[in-house]
Amino acid sequence: MFKFIANLLRPRPQLGPEAIQSAFREHYRNFRALLTANNNALELMSSAEDMLGSGKPFGMAFVRGDLTALTVNVYKMVHSLIALSDGRYQDLDERFKSITDQIEHILSRQPEVSGTAFVLTMDEIDRRVVDQVGAKMANLGEIRNHLGLRVPDGFVITAAAAKYFMESGHVQDEINRRLKTLDIDNLEALYTVSSDIQDLIRAAALPDDLDFIIRQQYARLADSQGRPVPVSLRSSALGEDTLQGSFAGQYRTRLNVEAAAIPATYKDIVAGKYQSQAIVYRQQRGYRHQDVLMCVGCLAMVDAVAGGVAYSRPHDDPRSPWAVIHAAPGLGTRIVDGSSVYDMLRVGREAPHDIAERRLADPQGGRACLTDDQARELTKLSVQIENHFGSPQDIEWAINTSGNLFILQARPIGQAAPAAQADVELAGRHVEQVPILSGGVTASRGVGAGAVYKVSCALDILEFPKDAVLVVETPYPEWAVLMNRASAVVSESGQSATHLATVAREFGVPALFDLAGAFARLDNGQTVTVDATARRLFEGRVEALLQAAPHRPNLMEGSPIHKLLKEALALITPLHLTAPDSPFFKPSSCRTLHDITRFCHEKALAEMFNFGHRYGARDKSAKQLFVVGMPAQWWVINLDDGFREGADLTTPFIQIEDIVSEPMLAIWKGMTAVPWAGPPPVSLRGLGAIIAQSAMNPQLDPAVRSNMTGRNYFLLSKNYCNLSVRLGYHFALAEASFSGLLTESYVNFQFQGGAADERRRRRRVRLLGDMLREIDFRVEIKGDSLTARIEKRPVPYLRERLVVLGYLLIHTRQVDMVMNEEGFINSYLDKIHADIHMIRESLHKEAGERIQ
Amino acid sequence: MRRPRNILLIDDEEDFLETTSRRLRRREFEVKTATRCAEAMPEVVAGWPHVVVLDVMLPDTDGMECLRLIKQVAHRLPVIMLTGHASMHASLQGLEHGASDYCLKPIELDELVEKIIIAYNDIN
């Protein structure tokens, strides 16, 4: 009500005809700018929403890029509207700023570093300090201090230390600058940037106080060991080993480091955060680089005679009664690198821990790395560690010269993602074709196909084609950089414990390892299907298997970047403003950027609609459309050059022949292409429902009319048309712009409400949505409202769809009246489809004739 | 839609200037380039450019400052900011100082050409 009075009191500008013409031009210019920005903003919002739901990897570059472009377009809308309305809606700018401030705040939020200590010793460490030392070292401390198991002595250089180091001398700023524009699909650029950044970190000076503290800690460790022991430096990234993100093998470990080399090695390990495979890994899993801080464990070396990996259960069978041990002479680190042969043991999890199987690396007279007792002891500890952490564990271990067993690392086993059922079906699926290779070890289940590409050195990686099958001799961790490009992995050697296998499982890339002869037998470019589940490899694509294969997991869900975008989108995409005649349709009700765009669009239309009236310019006022000598229930406002030159503008009417707006003529053509046969016979129940709804909702009563909402009108120029329709209780808005510039070429359509009960309204909207999809609209349906869009397409393409849209506007308006009569609905739909076909055919024929 | 003819590119990356100006010339624009704001200002003062494409990070003054200088001497000259710096804050700052648009690198040439044409027509 207040708004209504305020509207009346708005001074009417007193201008001469030329000034009115120029004011109108200015309005129209702002209106066009607002429309273009609106269209861009809608596209940017939907691309961010699509990305969030797609499961495809995206980084902060996408998030910032999309949201910056969105900000720019919404800003333009707000300011175009303010200009268009002679300064009203200033308060909209405040809403806009407040919302963008909140979004900016979310985007720039930094992970907090807890604790101030640069160093913690092993006896101070357990799960409670995981935020300071990373999961790997926190778990090790837990094993030492709460399970009382033997782990090496030493200390951890904390996250706070890493942050302090990286921020000293602005190393981090420089790194961020270099990463900002990096395209990780350009592998050559990736390698260059990765290696430059690592050099930068290695070359940076360690702050004196940090350097001093590290040396001091080492001196204490040497003291307690009674000699200057060499140490191992192990990465323990913060964020690592959580969230099903294993980061397996992405970072560095350095063994046998002498005292003097500790500071340099520390920097090298911190630099390892920017190894190319780690950069790719974070991008794929939705981590920001700043979400990962590199803590480093510094532990006395174990003088090992044997070492390896123990799985408290096999990775592919979480219910197995067996533990699996891989053992090799020395430290056994080569096992996880994929570069060594080893003994394999299967040992009962329950006491007395029977040894069910023992396969020696060298079956001819080789000596076993572990005694039976040692194997039993290791199994017992593995089960104990599993029980403590509550999930099956992947444990690195070593036995020293005195026969003491040390735990070096423990982490949850990366579980294979595909659902068990799909997998069982896959494994049993019979295929006529004979495999060209079979056997080996399932390192990651699933089926993948593509052209073979063999990789044996880093240089080969650069040439690796997207969706090829990666074929290698040895599964080195470095090949993980290809996990976002490979459709499957085949390796001559290696087993399921390698880091590469862990990463393949995590990414859902099928991997078949230990497949003898694969490297020699397969040729580059040859198309193959890898069935890693059933351990066989076929020539060509085997569609029966590929179709049965489970989808790749959504790697982004729940990651830091995914969460951040989701949080930001909560301030962007939900639409709270809907009914323009509601008292809450005002700037202060705008809670999201979408609300603001909706508000701007609606008010801009109203400004253009009311211009003629407000400025007392008759030729700018709404004119009633005259068709075949009769006034029709349609009003037209000419925004610019939508009327034929010389048309008579002195009357309150305009002839359809005087209209030259191409989008309007296209809609009109569709609206009149097939004569409306009158409403279909209405069933009594259907009619009753419609009447009841009209009574409950005064907005639907055709007698309640305000100037704009109650009419069917076109706003138009030569290349633009906005049509608002209230027909048979439906509200529809169609907007089209034709332009030589693709940025300005689009068709938007909204459809809402309509009497009839909710179930019918929803069903009608679905039917309409289906038909629009058939003519290539992108359709979004929420409840009973529908939006459909096509953008950035050439004019003839848009024109054809606009004609069909005009037809649909008229002919679906009362579909809901017969919604319950199945027989009617089907014959009705058949007729609509036939009509649409006929309309499109005739358009194509016209176009063809014009070309000839 | 009318097409502007003279485009002034200001960017500190020589590679970018070279490729972009070559491509714009192929689309029948006249192009001049500058790696610093000070180098660009005489052209602006002389009224040569119809549209300016400006990077946000420049070695002498920052792009925002350069934008302010340009707008002081040529209020109605359309300036498109084109940058690798994706920041909501910076983009709003640019628009408030009168930039016609704030676009992010990398940008397709077709898109840049459309933005140039739209910026030009919006102001003229």
Image (cartoon, rainbow, N blue to C red):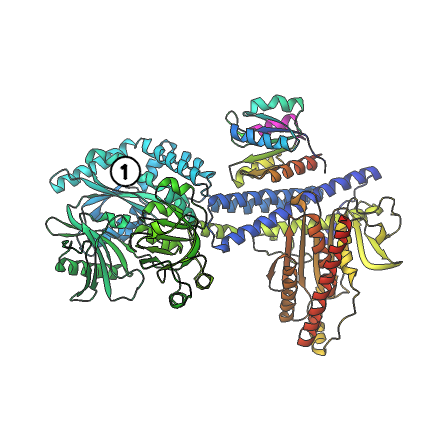
**Where residue B38 sits: x, y (%)?**
56, 22
Q: Quadrant of residue A178?
A: top left
Q: Residue at x 53, y 50 (%)?
A: A48
- Please name whichever residue, A729 or B51, is drawn nearer the observer in this view of the structure: B51
Asked if residue A442 lies left or right of residue A145, the reply is: right
B123 or A702: nearer the viewer: B123
Q: Nearer the viewer, residue A214 or A798?
A: A798
Residue B30 in the image: x percent, y percent? 65, 28
Asked if the stretch drawn in magenta spans residue A296, the answer is: no
Which residue sits at x=44%, y=42%?
Answer: A184
The quadrant of the image that shows the N terminus of chain A is bottom right
Percent x, y of residue A357: 20, 63
Give the image quarter of residue A85: top right
The stretch in magenta equals B65-77
Identify the residue at image location x=59%, y=24%.
Answer: B40
Residue A281: in sight, yes or no? no
User: In this figure, what is the number of numbered marks?
Assistant: 1
Rendered location of residue A30, percent (x, y):
70, 42
Secondary structure mostly seen in the magenta stretch:
helix
Q: Which residue is mark 1?
A: A266
Left of B70 or right of it: where is A372? left
Asked if residue B67 is positioned above or below residue A129 in the image, the reply reads above
- Image height of B123 relative to A152, above or below: above
Residue at 74% of width from left, 62% of height from top?
Answer: A838
Identify which amino acid the numbered label 1 is placed on: Tyr
